[in-house]
Amino acid sequence: MTDHLLEVRDLSVEFHTAAGTVKAVQNVSWHLDRGETLAILGESGSGKSVSASAVMNLIDMPPGRITSGQILLNGQDMLVMTAEQRRQINGCKIAMIFQDPLAHLNPVYSVGWQIAEMVTTHGGTRDKAQARALDLLRRVGIPEPELAMRKYPHQFSGGQRQRLMIAMALACKPDILIADEPTTALDVTVQAQVLELLEELQRETGMGLLLITHDLGVVAEIADRVVVMNGGQIVETGNAAEVYRNPRHPYTRKLIDAAPGKGQMPVERDRTGQPLLRAERLTKSYGAFHALKGVDLTIMPGETVAVVGESGSGKSTLARAILRLDDPDGGRILYRGDDLMAMAPRQLFGLRRDLQMVFQDPTQSLNPRMTVFQLISEAWVIHPDILPKAQWKDRAADLLVKVGLRPEMAARYPHQFSGGQRQRIAIARALAMEPKLIVCDEAVSALDVSIQAQVIELLDGLRREFGLSYLFIAHDLPVVRDFADRVVVMKSGEIVEEGPVRQIFDAPRHPYTRALLSASLDPDPVVQAARRTARQLETA
Amino acid sequence: MTGFIGKRALASGISLIGLVILVFFLSRLTGDPTNLYLPLDASIEAREQFRQLHGFNDPLIVQFGRYVMDLAQGDFGESLQQARPAMEVVLQAFGWTLRLALITMTCVTVAAIVIGSLAAFKVGGIFDRIATFFSLVGASAPDFWLAIVAIVIFAVNLHWLPTSGTGTPWHWVLPVAVLFVRPFGLILQVVRGSMITTLSSAYVKTARAKGVRTRSIIFVHGLRNAMLPVITVIGDQAAAILNGAVVIETIFGFPGIGKLMIDSILLRDFSVVLASIMISAVAIFIMNLLIDIAYAMLDPRIRY
């Protein structure tokens, strides 16, 4: 039998924690050949990164333990090698890039030094390493490479940092590149560029690419084969297009169904009458940076308005300005005709309960020392007129049921819940105020796709039940497609296009909206291939 | 950077002036030094003459004015006790203390960083446990007790080392060793804690994926990042010794600034007290400045 470039056979890894033994992966087998792209697809906790960590010898033992299996590089079992042999393979034969490149680059060394270190570590001279680093910076498209050599990671943008990571990984011309969620934290247009760069480099070098991702779109864009993982086991494996078209395992089917952007788009609503909230010519500057340059926005009662834009577009500033969490520098905010900006603090306090916010990261926005009951009932402590104390317990239980949790969970603390459950708690807390408008700032961005779909469904249901309005901030267009009534596209502090959801998706007018749409990845490999061809034609 | 240093110097200068005013008047409140310097049976005329000579008969405010005028001309006054310029006395003592602090803190820093880093690399390992035990003991051992025990064992019983003085390098061993213990314990703990955080960071994972050698991971990738909180504590501890390791200097008869300060306060040698305080303040100012500069050198994200 011919050897694969890299083969994982029957690998099982356990972690011994205070809470007991966790079987992170069980009897996992996959292989990667030269010039091939294999994607390991899974949600958080599926164990998708564990086998790659085992390949790189990055699992801390203890608490980790490899209980069975082999990892074969060109037919040789890496698990029986000495630590020194493993060290020489790392970086040299197999290199790895990670999600969140800012955290994964050493903040106190220049990027030139960090790239060159890869070469010197594996026996290259200082001069050779410098030259190679400079070459690579040029190759991955960093502007002014000579200058960039002496700069530090914090002086680059997110996309550039991932390019730096890629340059570093390729410094020793590895046979295999492992990319762990390489584009997850990036804007869609930047994501497309980084994936394109990875593909180009793979064609040039013929390396095998192992991609770990939670995103079907990334799989569709770049993978030849896909391994789907759930609960530490491989549930399905095969050709990427084949698996998408013909998923055999129920979990794969569930994942594909949960991918956003395929449902019915809502019909256009009647927009006459008094708006619930109206922002006029909002401006906000941070020093010399103009975050908002005169933004107008109208939200009707019961309407969901999505604000979509990439990082730095001013979308979160807009959300915070509307709630007066950060006061805007100029403009007016009319809530049912009353100017929030001109309101006395006492009057504003009364209105606060009408306007609620759900944040991106529920781990940070829920006080870890408070029980769920305390978190929810705090609303009634602050606004005692909402509910008499005798009813707090029942209402809290009621709200928990509404958001799909169980009443007895009220006694628990936030850390005892999963990410999706925590976001439900945050929503229950917002609902406790009986608000008219909920501002969701990237409220589903940190969640797994299947959880994302559930939370969006929940929000949609609550809207119908309570007649809520939403201002839904997102960086991703497909997420808002089946949910929003209107879409506002922002770029550099300005609204570039605004309209009913159908118009934005079916007939986008502004070039930036079109760029956003074409850069967002479709989970269908066929659609994605067509888009790629179209993109290439456009640039050619 | 120069602007930053200037601003800091200005702020420190203002606090120094405040300090001098405060100390000047407080020390005069302790009474008249005349009776301390003249024999018990000195005549009233002799006492009056002594007061006249040193200006203790003038109102306080006049004395202060004279002191400030002298200061402006670089005159820090005379030491009553030694009949030499006060600044000369203080600088001499400070020189001794500075040497003591430098030697001690160099040993402490090197030992704490190496041992703390290695302990952090394998948390819960046998090396880590031993290091943690000794750092706890060190950080909590009272230094006067250590000093006395050390003298009893090494000087009195074993006759290996001298009990006090500064004559030979051997005289330095005991004071340095005793002064070493507490800062070593404290800094070791900070290094260990900071290194544990750093070694579990994402960029250390990257370094491991790059195949960087363990030694480089600890001392190149880890240490520089872990040093920021450590430097603050090193500065603190160094300042504590510079400000006078009073107890240790007294026990070992070490002619440093701590001993000088205590002696001059007891003898109401006002000029020396004031000069010592000024020198200490300047030393601390420079110390803090060095810490800030070290911060900026270690971490490119910090710019003043």
Image: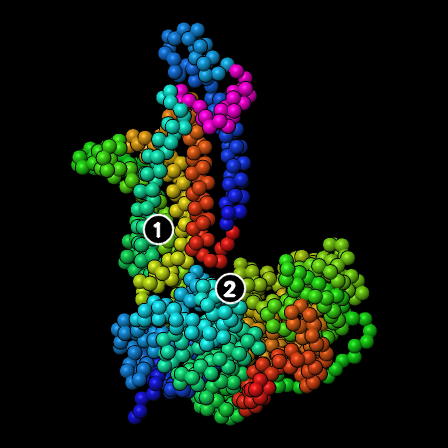
Q: Read off the chain for label 1.
A: B
Could you say where residue B70 lies in the image, as x and y percent from the top left?
A: 49, 24
- Residues tagged by mark 1 and mark 2 found on one chain of the structure: no
Magenta stretch, residue numbers: B58-80
| Residue A33 vertical placement versus A127 (above, below) | below
Circle 2: element type: helix
The 10 Å Cα crowd at callout 1, few under 14, some 14 to 19, many 20 or more, is many
Give the image quarter of residue B239: top left
Residue A31 falls left or right of residue A540 = left
Give the image quarter of residue B245: top left
Residue A487 falls left or right of residue B57 = right
- Residue A405 appears in the picture as rendered: no
Q: How is the image coloured?
A: rainbow
- The residue where tag 2 is placed is A155
Which residue does the image show at 51% across and 39% down from the upper left?
B12
Q: Amino acid at mark 2?
A: Gln
Asked whether residue B259 is drawn in magenta, I would say no
Which residue does the image show at 68% across and 82% down from the upper left?
A508
| Residue B188 marker | 1
| Residue B59 vertical placement versus A89 (above, below) | above
Q: Read off the chain for label 2.
A: A
Could you say where residue B219 lies in the image, as x and y percent from the top left?
A: 34, 59
